[in-house]
């Protein structure tokens, strides 16, 4: 891990907080998978769209390694038309869908990280492929809308609309809505935790919330935010830059931004949390795990020692990333394929 940080320092990359959001997105797209494992070949990869409540069509990508292999992966990518049904609807048709299976597949809705301002399906493509390959479950990655063009709570609404749509319409893609999980990393982990609470409130059954170093608090009020405030991949300046694009400081007490402030977490889906030891967010991740446990929610917690935020996408250079892939896939198998 130290060598990765030293090489990054020598590269003298321009700090993200000196960029516009558009520039930061482009810069992240260029480097996001630089340290990833070789891109796994997955039997089924399909791009499609999920409608949001305001009519916006959100890009999504389905990964499933249980489908019959095609002659080449390029032939397995089907461009699906938007289904044209609002979240919660009960009917719809696909255009160009090739399910490749005869029974419904368990599925994880994955929400990418990036401080609510950067990141995309593309930046987390290798990760989602590997989770699908190792877990034996399907993965749907969602491009929710980003700040500052779309401020809080748009990302929350998009994530929740995506989860509701999968529950109502997943069968049209050969998925099993009764075996559904939600997860994500960093800001995506925050959104996943919020979606799990919203699912509890409306009786939408979830088998698991897979939370990867999620942000859970409203302010920098844990020791790790001070201890790891500078010198690592995610520092306090970058956190402030992200959040300043997403919502004003006076609105940060909303539990949909800071799920640690949720008044009640009892009855929420079982959780599997992965935290990085050397991460400004590690203490708030621990605090959220404790809050869930105190409410009687089953929690599995993994703390990966000596690594930093974003380590899960460094499988080419650190073994902890590959261990995470294995651990997360095992958690999905336990929850979705009992």
Image: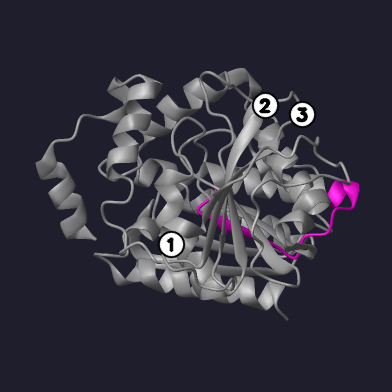
Quadrant housing residue 101? bottom right
For marks 1 and 2, give the CA distance: 29 Å
Residue under pointer 1: 73
| Residue in the foreground of this view, choosing between 149 and 166 | 166
For marks 2 and 3, give the CA distance: 7 Å
Q: Is residue 56 above or below residue 120?
A: above
Residue 66 rendering spot, x and y as whole percentages: 59, 73
Quadrant housing residue 154? top right
Classify mark 2: helix, strand or loop.
loop
The image's colour scheme reads one colour
At horizontal 78% and vertical 46% (from top left) the residue drawn is 93
Mark toward the viewer: 1 or 3 = 1
- What range of the chain is rendered magenta? 200-214
How dense is the environment of label 3, judged by Cα within 10 Å: few (below 14), some, or many (20 and up)?
A: some
Residue under pointer 2: 56
Classify mark 1: helix, strand or loop.
helix
Tell me if 273 is positioned left or right of 201 in this view: left
At horizontal 55% and vertical 51% (from top left) the residue drawn is 78
Q: Is residue 42 above or below residue 283?
A: below
At horizontal 27% and vertical 56% (from top left) the residue drawn is 35
**Numbered tag placed on residue 147 in the rendering:** none
User: For the image shown, how many numbered marks are present on the structure?
Assistant: 3
Quadrant housing residue 259? top right
Residue 96 rendering spot, x and y as whole percentages: 64, 49
Q: Is residue 197 above or below residue 246?
A: below
Residue 230 rendering spot, x and y as whole percentages: 29, 39
Outermost residue on the bottom side: it is 338
| Residue in the foreground of this view, choosing between 86 and 261 | 86
Residue 273 visible: yes
């Amino acid at each position: 891990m130290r060598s990765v940080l030293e090489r990054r320092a020598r590269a003298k990359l321009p700090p993200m907080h000196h960029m516009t959001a558009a520039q930061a997105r482009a810069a992240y797209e260029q480097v996001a998978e630089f340290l990833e494992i070789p891109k796994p070949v997955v039997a089924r990869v399909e791009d499609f769209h999920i409608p949001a409540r305001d009519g916006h069509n959100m890009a999504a990508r389905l990964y499933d390694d249980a489908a019959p292999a095609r002659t080449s992966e390029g032939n397995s990518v089907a461009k699906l038309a938007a289904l044209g049904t609002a979240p919660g609807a009960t009917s719809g048709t696909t255009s160009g869908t090739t399910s490749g299976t005869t029974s419904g597949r368990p599925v994880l809705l994955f929400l990418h990280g990036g401080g609510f301002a950067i990141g995309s399906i593309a930046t987390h493509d290798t990760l989602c492929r590997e989770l699908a390959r190792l877990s034996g479950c399907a993965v749907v990655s969602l491009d929710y809308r980003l700040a500052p063009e779309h401020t809080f709570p748009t990302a929350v609404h998009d994530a929740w609309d995506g989860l509701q749509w999968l529950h109502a319409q997943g069968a049209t893609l050969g998925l099993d809505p009764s075996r559904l999980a939600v997860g994500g990393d960093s800001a995506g982990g925050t959104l996943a935790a919020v979606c799990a609470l919203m699912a509890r409130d409306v009786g939408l059954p979830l088998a698991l919330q897979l939370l990867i170093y999620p942000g859970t608090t409203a302010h920098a009020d844990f020791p790790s935010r001070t201890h790891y405030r500078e010198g690592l991949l995610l520092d306090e300046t970058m956190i402030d830059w992200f959040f300043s694009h997403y919502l004003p400081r006076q609105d940060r007490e909303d539990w949909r931004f800071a799920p640690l402030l949720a008044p009640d977490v009892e009855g929420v889906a079982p959780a599997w949390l992965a935290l990085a030891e050397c991460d400004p967010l590690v203490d708030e991740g621990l605090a959220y795990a404790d809050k869930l446990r105190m409410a009687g929610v089953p929690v599995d917690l993994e703390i990966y020692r000596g690594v930093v935020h974003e380590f899960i996408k460094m499988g080419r250079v650190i073994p902890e990333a590959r261990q995470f892939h294995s651990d997360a896939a095992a958690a999905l198998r336990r929850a979705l394929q009992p």
